[in-house]
């Protein structure tokens, strides 16, 4: 299936991936806003700080992930079997400086892991705070 059809399928998969990353980014920003402004959280100060930091890291990597999507789309070639195999080339400073190469996995995994960590720590801290003391 080394054809235009294959490339089309890869681009469709990349589109779904972009949508997922975008939805996760919106959800993460909402969660970050809620955790940072809520005065009624019953979790410890340390847990709250960890959750805020994890959500912030997730937001940063989401932005990196979404920035790589068009570069990956441009780099897809017929021999590529997965969007995760494509390495995007970019410059940190638009027109000058060294070129860097980065696969999607390098930014989407930290995005997802930090989001999951924030959710797990928040849920555990909330459960611990809600536990009746004896």
Image (spheres, helix red, strand yellow):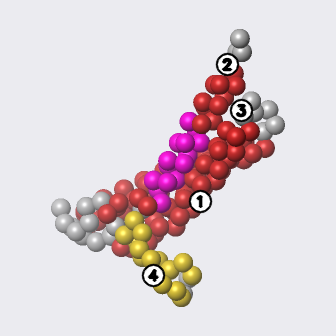
Proximity of marks 2 and 1: CB atoms separated by less than 8 Å: no
Please tell me the numbered disc located at residue 60.
1
For label 2, the SS is: loop
**Distance from label 3 to label 1 (Cα)?**
24 Å
Mark earlier in primary sequence (2, 4):
4
Residue with the mark numbered 3: 43
Mark earlier in primary sequence (2, 1):
1
For label 1, the SS is: helix
**Distance from label 2 to label 3 (Cα)?**
11 Å
Mark earlier in primary sequence (3, 1):
3
Residue 56: where, in percent of width, then height?
64, 53
Using the image, determine if residue 94 lies above or below residue 75: below
Residue with the mark numbered 4: 99
Residue stretch rendered in magenta on the structure = 107-120
User: In the shown orientation, is residue 33 left or right of residue 104?
Assistant: right
Mark earlier in primary sequence (3, 4):
3
Proximity of marks 3 and 4: CB atoms separated by less than 8 Å: no
Q: Is residue 43 magenta?
A: no
Residue 52: where, in percent of width, then height?
67, 47
């Amino acid at each position: 299936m080394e054809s235009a059809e294959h490339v089309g399928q890869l681009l469709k998969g990349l589109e779904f991936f972009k949508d997922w990353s975008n939805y996760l980014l919106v959800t993460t920003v909402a969660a970050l806003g809620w955790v940072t402004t809520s005065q009624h959280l019953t979790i410890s100060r340390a847990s709250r700080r960890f959750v805020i930091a994890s959500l912030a890291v997730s937001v940063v990597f989401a932005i990196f992930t979404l920035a790589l999507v068009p570069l990956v789309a441009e780099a897809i070639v017929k021999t590529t079997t997965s969007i995760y195999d494509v390495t995007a080339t970019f410059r940190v400073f638009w027109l000058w400086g060294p070129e860097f190469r980065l696969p999607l996995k390098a930014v989407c995994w930290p995005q997802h892991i930090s989001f999951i960590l924030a959710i797990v720590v928040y849920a555990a801290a909330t459960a611990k705070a809600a536990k009746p003391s004896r």
